[in-house]
Amino acid sequence: MSGRTQLMWDEAVTGYDFGRDHPMDPVRLVLTRSLVAALGLDREVAVVEAKTAGESTLRLVHREDYIGAVRAASKDPAAADQSYGLGTTDDPAFAGMHEASALIAGQSVGAAEAVWRGETLHAVNFAGGLHHAMPGAASGFCVYNDAALAVARLLELGVERVAYIDVDVHHGDGVQAAFWEDPRVLTVSLHEHPRTLFPQTGWPEETGADSAQGSAVNVALPAGTGDEGWLRAFHAVVPELLADFRPQVLVTQHGADTHFEDPLAHLAVSLDAQRAVQVACHELAHEYADGRWVALGGGGYAVVEVVPRSWTHLVGIAAGKPVDPTTMIPESWRQEVYARTRQPGPMRMTDGRSPVTWASWEDGYDPADRLDQAVLATRRAVFPLRGLLP
């Protein structure tokens, strides 16, 4: 391995813009990149502009007719074909949509290539993690599924086992669907229960096709789950599965929409717990994947208060320069926040809940606790398929 941690960044990703009133405001990307710089983390990484994903790369996951529909809608948004999920409320068509979406995909693919080829040990693309896009349709603010494309490219390069861990509040349905029949890919998604949140999938019983039983893992968390329950669920499922699967590369998706201030979901997780899972993913990559780690962004709609801090922590952890939660945020960044959004920016890199503690699964199962019930449902559904005890 040579080179520092790579941060994939190109200002043009801010062209991924569904419009003024859409929750996925690209200002969240601008402010994250700016906070990374304000804290000096861009001096600790190699900032890389990856090339846009071409047709052959996109077709590793997406159907040719769908790519054609995205191209057509990109040129003429008014003519978007809604049968492909384009021109809808969630995924409005916009000029340049294909180019911006393919650039984000190219960054995640480039991150995966760099990690596997030994050019870097860790790579971060916080503009990525668009995990809902399906092979033949846009969905849930996602046009091209960069996360699935990164995994598919790793397989094309000869990787035999890839683990994908998704801690977005929404089920990682598009990535699961892409590898439903492929035992070379372990997909694990921790998300709010499908009874209460889009996309209404991600039940514990979804465990993969007959040819890949036990390769899809879903932890459906009760609405209202907070730090202790979220971390308990993560540690009750993920490390044991990775120890069994032994991935050669770990790809993780870090949607920041689990946060208690996120307007589109119903979990109650703090920034400090999000940081704790980022640290855990870093450690798990070193323990089970020789350190090979591709870290992506994802959802997150508290675009000032939460997203920039969460993903800046992710960059710092990947760079080997973790930001202390008590760090005060530079006034220059807070002034930029106000200039761009007319909102006050946060003062510190913490929600005041650090260190975060939780009870391990080994400390005992409480049959009356809804969180424990959810974890046990997942373990019972998947672990025996992998030869593990539930």
Image: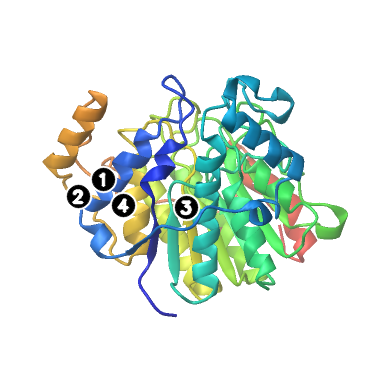
User: Counting residues from the N terminus, which is met first, the one under dot 3 or under dot 2?
Assistant: 2
The x and y percentages for residue 341 are: 26, 26
The x and y percentages for residue 322 are: 29, 60
Residue type at mark 1? Ser
Residue 357 can be seen, yes or no = yes
* Element on which disc 2 rests: helix
Q: Nearer the viewer, mark 3 or mark 1?
A: 1
User: What residue lies at 55% left-to-right and 50% top-to-bottom?
Assistant: 105
* Element on which disc 1 rests: helix
Neighbourhood count class around disc 1 (C-alpha, 10 Å): few under 14, some 14–19, many 20 upward = some
User: Counting residues from the N terminus, which is met first, the one under dot 4 or under dot 2?
Assistant: 2
Label placed on residue 355: 4
Q: Using residue 370 as the reference point, say whether residue 381 is left or right of it.
A: right
Q: Which residue is mark 2?
A: 38
Residue type at mark 2? Ala
Using the numbered discs, state the Cα–Cα distance from disc 3 to disc 1 in whole angstroms.
36 Å
